[in-house]
Structure formats: C-alpha cells, structure tokens
Image: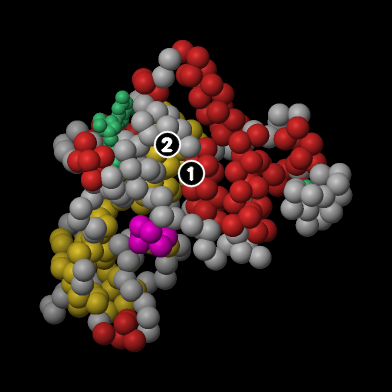
Amino acid sequence: MVGKIIKQISNDYTVKVDDKLYICKARGKFRNMHITPLVGDNVKIDEENNYILEILDRKNELDRPSVSNIDQVVIVTSVKIPDFSSNLLDKLLTIIEFNNIKPVICFTKLDLLNEEEIKHIKEIMNYYKQIGYEVYSNTDSNLKDIFKDKITVFAGQSGAGKSSLLNRLDNTLNLEIGEVSIALGRGRHTTRHTELIEVLGGLIADTPGFSSIDFRGMKKSDIRDNFIEFNEYRDICEYKDCMHINELKCMVKDKVNDNTILKSRYENYLKFVEKGEL
Ligand SMILES: Nc1nc2c(ncn2[C@@H]2O[C@H](COP(=O)(O)OP(=O)(O)OP(=O)(O)O)[C@@H](O)[C@H]2O)c(=O)[nH]1
Ligand SMILES: [Mg+2]
Ligand SMILES: [Zn+2]
C-alpha cells in the first residue's frame, strides 16, 4: 500500500493512505543505507505490522525543515517587527531556486507602516514581481488559490507571521501564535516535529524560523546563477563566466548602476558569494 508521510515524531512516521492514518516505524535497512524517511515522502508500507518498506523517488528535499517533494516555498517576509530583511529574503530565494523549488513571496505587517514606508516597500514588491516572482501581501484574497494539490512549506523569520497567516487562510486551524516565541527568543515550536497540515486542498508545513539555512553545497557560481535576473544579462558580459564582481565590461554591474537591478540585491549577492564555496 502506498501513502504519504505527513508527520514525524522521533521514530514514528504518520503515513496517510487515502483517509486513513498509520503510525509506522522505518525498516532497519534504511539506517544501514543512511536514508531517513522524510515528511513528504511517498512510501510503500506494510499496514499489518506498521512498517515503512520502501521510499519512492523524491523530486526534491530540504534539509531544515526536513521535507521532501515540495512544490513551493512561501517566504513569509515581515516588513516591521521584525524589520524587513532583504538579506534573508534574497538568501532564501537563492537557496530555494538552487533546490529547484518554486519560491513565492508573501509580505506581512504592511499595516504597521506609514505612508512613506509603504511606498518604499511597494517599490520593492514590484521589483520582485517584475523579475518574475509571485508576490503577495498576507491580506490578499487570491493567496487562497495557490495551495490546492500542492505541498507548500512556509519559511521565514520567527515572528514574521507564518502561523497567523495559516490561521487566516483556514480559521479552523487555531495554530498557536505570537508572544511565546518572542519571550523564548526562538521559534514557537517547542515541539520540534515537522508536520504537513491540510489547508485549502493542499498540504502545508508550518516551520519554526528558517534562519539556520545556509549555502551548504552551493558553489559561488551556483549563487550567481540563482540570482535569476542576472541571467538575462550574462551573455552580454565580456566574459562568458563573468561573476559580475571585478570584471570589466560587465552588463550586470552596468544594470546595477542605472538602477535596473535593485542595489540591495546586488549587495546581498556580493555578501553571499564571499561565503559560498569555491
Ligand atoms: N500588525 C500585524 N501583526 C501581525 C501580522 N501577522 C502576524 N502578526 C503578529 O506577529 C506576531 C507573530 O506572529 P506568528 O504568526 O506567531 O509568527 P511566526 O512566523 O509563526 O513565528 P514562529 O512560529 O516563531 O516562527 C503575532 O503577535 C501576530 O499577531 C500582520 O499582518 N500585522
Ligand atoms: Mg509559528
Ligand atoms: Zn558580469
């Protein structure tokens, strides 16, 4: 019988087959093969003895949170409390792109901005739209339409409003929000388990913060290639493998200078490349 792992608590995997749930253990052979079943995996189970027998091929996987077969990551981005971090947004975008997953950006807390600040944030939102991303605010009603038949991971800083947004999308959820996490100075999820919950016809993983994510496994050129708007200009750069840093006749740098490319994007790029592996 084949089902999907929707929850993991230490060695117990909850496998959903149609509308039935089975709490299964993983067969010892997986440990010997250094494979850990992940939430999101499609698995063959022995439903008599509650064992996972086989993990079907994954289309992708993320490390933290450990989820596989992800269709999209919604990057929940607060504009105030916590302040907007273009660094974290660009970092998540680059890493998610590298993992061949579709990123979606959702801004929160625009209600806390004054008129001038809103104007500035709207310009930033438009920039990300214009380079090809889906961009929403958490109050947009059409946000409800993007989850059907998909596995979605919610990512973003602690306090950004991930759980609040999920509650807004489905008011029967009653996920815990707020103060607790701030008091503890870390993610609200004192339980560390990962779980996919059914929302609006799809499955969504709420995650505690996402800030420990890093560029592991990415080369400097991978970072470059996943700043998607740079790729439009790379063929015009003098050097085919231009890193857009010190090279002369670099079209990307020209586009930063004439404000076609957002300055903060380019500055973040420079910072990331410093940290990326050679
Ligand atoms: N003003 C305002 N407050 C918001 C908005 N969205 C969320 N909040 C508040 O922000 C705080 C944190 O929200 P949560 O939903 O718990 O944040 P989270 O991203 O789930 O945080 P972690 O679970 O710690 O990762 C709560 O006090 C919410 O009420 C918004 O759009 N506007
Ligand atoms: Mg939360
Ligand atoms: Zn260049």
Percent coordinates x, y for residue 68 in the rendering: 38, 61
Q: Is 63 inside the magenta-drawn segment?
A: yes
Task: Say which amino acid is labelled 2.
Answer: Thr
Query: What segment is highlighted magenta in the picture?
Result: 62-67
What residue would you read off at disc 1? Answer: 88
Name the residue rendered at 74%, 53% in the picture.
Answer: 243
Label 1 environment density (alpha carbons within 10 Å; few <14, some 14–19, many ≥20):
some
Q: Quadrant of residue 177?
A: top left
Choose between 142 and 179: the one closer to the eye: 179
Upstream in sequence: badge 2 or badge 1: 2
Percent coordinates x, y for residue 246 in the rendering: 79, 49
Question: In this view, which residue lies farthest toward the left?
Answer: 48
159 in relation to 152, above or below = above
Name the residue rendered at 52%, 48% in the picture.
Answer: 91
Would residue 254 be found to the left or right of residue 7 on screen?
right
127 in relation to 253, above or below = above
What residue would you read off at disc 2? Answer: 77
Q: Are marks 2 and 1 in contact (CB under 8 Å)?
A: yes
Name the residue rendered at 15%, 61% in the picture.
Answer: 20
